[in-house]
Image: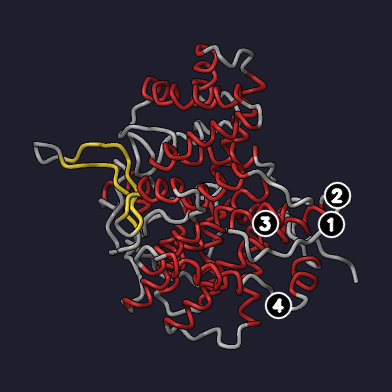
Amino acid sequence: MEKRNYAAITPEITALAALCETSNFIEPAMYQKYQVNRGLRDLNGKGVLTGLTEISEVQAKKTGENGEEVPCAGELYYRGYNIKDLTHGFLADKRFGFEEITYLLLFGELPTQEQLTRFCETLANYRSLPNSFVRDLIMKAPSTNMMNSLARSVLTMYSYDLNPDDTGIPNVLRQCLQLIAMFPMLSVYGYLAYDYYLKGNRSFFIHEPDAKLSTAENLLHMLRIDSRYTELEAKILDLALVLHAEHGGGNNSSFTTHVVSSSGTDTYSAIAAALGSLKGPRHGGANIKVCEMMESMKETVVHWDNESEVADYLQKLLRKEAFDGSGLIYGIGHAIYSVSDPRAEIFRAFVEKLAAEKHLEKEFALYATVERMAPQVIAAERKIYKGVSANVDFYSGFVYRMLGLPVELFTPIFAVARIAGWSAHRLEELVGRGKIIRPAYMAVHPRRAYIPIAERKS
């Protein structure tokens, strides 16, 4: 039987695609005419309220003396606790924090030492995959995109679950804890299969997770052939997981989790939908774009310490004359934050330490220069409705690259962290048992009379 090229785009498809573009285009002015907040955001980037949550809060504005909202330094709260206080707490005690933060997000309170120990033991007990899962699913069908590999693995776990459709809280919590524990394995093993079978690298190895290690340590242990890592490497990866674990109910993937969970579907379908959201480059792939942009800058800018040369390159980015022609400076600006992103502020000091350990001080200095100058260049080049600053993605890709993590795993590692927040949001939606989420759309196509097929003209 002749093999079919499923990726082929025929001339007929090309013609039909043009018809799709014509028939589905809506004039942008119509959104203002009918006062529709496209993307559930107004012109200032403020989100439309669609729900209530106790899980986390993002704050970028405060009420001034005249009663008007004014931009302020960004703040992030997990269950009412300031993220800066939380990170300071476990860092001061020289502990890993991701498991503690996951407990907080799921159960609403900081754990005692005994509760945290038992919780870590529970996750360690769930760090295993069904017999032959790696061989039959991951190794036999490697994917070129690790997010698709991860989503396929999650959906397949439905078939191994003896009670997959029970949406009672005990069963959903059990499923969420298993997925939180499995995500590092599914991500790393998916990459190793891709690296060996599709990229053709000679070495293939599988390290089982170590029950004594944290999530961050296990990621490095499973990914590196010698399983070796420094204390700073593990600490900064753990910090990255904490900072990416949750970010308010309105981010695209968490909102997706709420929307899909509100229909009453199973946990695996809900989390796979969230993964599909996070895969999008506008959400989970931003740090990859930052790395690619910075590589282009390093090749173009001769003197990295020359601010005028850096500013000139940034101007070319905005004018669509450099890199990918998008007109964007990746990693600068955020849908909510304007003055500062607290995650980037927390991350920055540790990024500098890791850069020193890796002897990449000059590269870090270039990042710092771009962070400082980009808002000024943007303000001079175009009208903006709110301030801009570096977001956490500006530094996270640099960190992952310094850790030797393959770029294919950048977004899956985001998912390894965010599964904690998704799980909390799924449980919150199910506990509330609200109505199915169904926002309104205004139809703007004029009415038409039916035309018999013999009378239609092409």
Badge 3 is on which residue? Answer: 146
Element under disc 2: loop
* On-image quarter of the N terminus: bottom right
- Give the mark, 3 or 1, whose residue is nearer the N terminus: 3
The earlier-in-sequence mark between 4 and 3 is 4
Residue 260 in percent (x, y) is at 45, 71
- Say what secondary structure mark 1 lies in: loop
Question: Of circles 4 and 3, which is in front?
Answer: 4
Q: Identify the mark nearer the N-term, 4 or 1.
A: 4
Q: CA distance from mark 4 to mark 3?
A: 20 Å
Say what secondary structure mark 3 lies in: helix
Residue furthest out toward the left = 66
Find out whether the residues at labels 4 and 1 contact each other: C-beta distance under 8 Å: no
Residue on which the image places disc 1:
204
Mark 3 vs mark 1: in front = 1
Q: Is residue 9 visible?
A: no
Measured Cα–Cα span from mark 4 to mark 2: 26 Å
Left or right relative to 96: residue 51: left
Which labelled disc corresponds to residue 130? 4
Residue type at mark 2? Asn
On-image quarter of the C terminus: bottom right
101 up-or-down from 82: above or below: below
Q: Name the residue beneath numbered marker 2.
A: 201
The x, y position of residue 191, in whole percent, is 72, 56
Tell me the residue at 40%/66% (across/down): 112
Q: Position of residue 202 (x, y in %)?
A: 89, 51
Q: Is residue 189 left or right of residue 168?
A: right
Q: Nearer the viewer, mark 1 or mark 2?
A: 1
